[in-house]
Amino acid sequence: MIVQYVRYRVPSELSDDFVEAYQRAAACLSRAPQCVDYELARSTAEPSSYILRITWTSAKDQLEGFRNRDLYQEFSAATAPFADDVEETSLYQRTAVRGDGGSIPSMYDWVGGTEALERLMERFYDLVASDDLIGPLFKGMDPGHPRYVAMWLAEVFGGPARYTTERGGYRHMLTMHLGKAITEPMRRRWVSLLMDAADQVEIPDDPEFRAAFAGYIEWGTRLAFSNSQPGAHPVQQAPVPHWGWGVAPPYNG
Ligand code: HEM
């Protein structure tokens, strides 16, 4: 891990604009898998002085991962008006001296990445195909469907944003559920078969992971249920949601 510090001196009349610009830029950091955490702090003694601290997974990830991607373009566009106010920017190696707050892996990393999610989804849709209640809903499904849903889940759990960049993002997923008239017993069966598949392919079964995973699945299936009802008026445009550990992150011993 590497810590980047950027010191700014911002004219006081621009301080609100500066913080607002960083609120926009921060959305990019929140989505960047290379970013562990970040904070913008303002000096109490000299209110025109700000320090931005960003912890990156590594200098290489920051340079080759973040700075080479679209998110960086967005980040730079938001902060460009304050480029001349930067007084210093430096990268620091962390030392052994530190307290709580090491990086918490994303749920995507914890589950085993794309390979594990694809394995899970292949098994799940095998179970679905032979299920009397929900099998018929998926009769004409695209053969790539398990992979697409794995891609969606990967993005939700903090992995690559490929469902957004390659598959049409939230809007496409929504469209696929519209008018399907999912019933509550169907939703329950979907959840239950997914949990069976999770046990069968042996994705992590620690309480923290399974609780967070089940939380998302409960939430997502309830949205799919309501969005699928005839006459529903769901939100048409939204980012792919990001799901995290909630109140019980992995136990570090
Ligand atoms: C967390 C819950 C859910 C997630 C994450 C999810 C995800 C998705 C995604 C990403 C697609 C579009 C795939 C593509 O890009 O082509 C899709 C399509 C679909 N979903 Fe869901 N879904 C959920 C719940 C449900 C439930 C509860 C049902 C029904 C019981 C359902 C039925 C369908 C059907 C029938 C399609 C269209 C399949 C096809 O014809 O290719 N989904 N779902």
Image: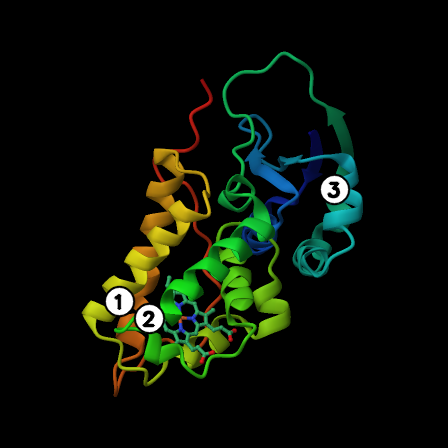
Q: Residue at x 35, y 70 (%)?
A: 130
Q: What residue did someone put label 3 on?
A: 61
83 vs 38, left or right, is right
**Mark 2 touching mark 1, by CB under 8 A?**
yes
**99 up-or-down from 22: above or below:** above
Labels 3 and 2: the sequence-earlier one: 3
Left or right relative to 116: residue 9:
right
**Closer to the camera in the image, 82 or 103:** 103
The residue type indicated by label 3 comes to Asp
Q: Which residue is mark 2?
A: 224
Residue 84 screen position, x and y as percent: 78, 48
In this view, the mark in front (3 or 2): 2
> Which quadrant is the C terminus positioned in?
top left
Color theme of the render: rainbow
In the shown orientation, is residue 59 left or right of residue 237? Answer: right
Among numbered discs 2 and 1, the one appearing first in the sequence: 1
Q: Residue at x 57, y 25 (%)?
A: 45
Question: In the image, what residue type sits under mark 1?
Answer: Arg
Q: Quadrant of the N terminus?
A: top right
> Is 160 placed above or below 103 here?
below
Q: Which residue is mark 1?
A: 187
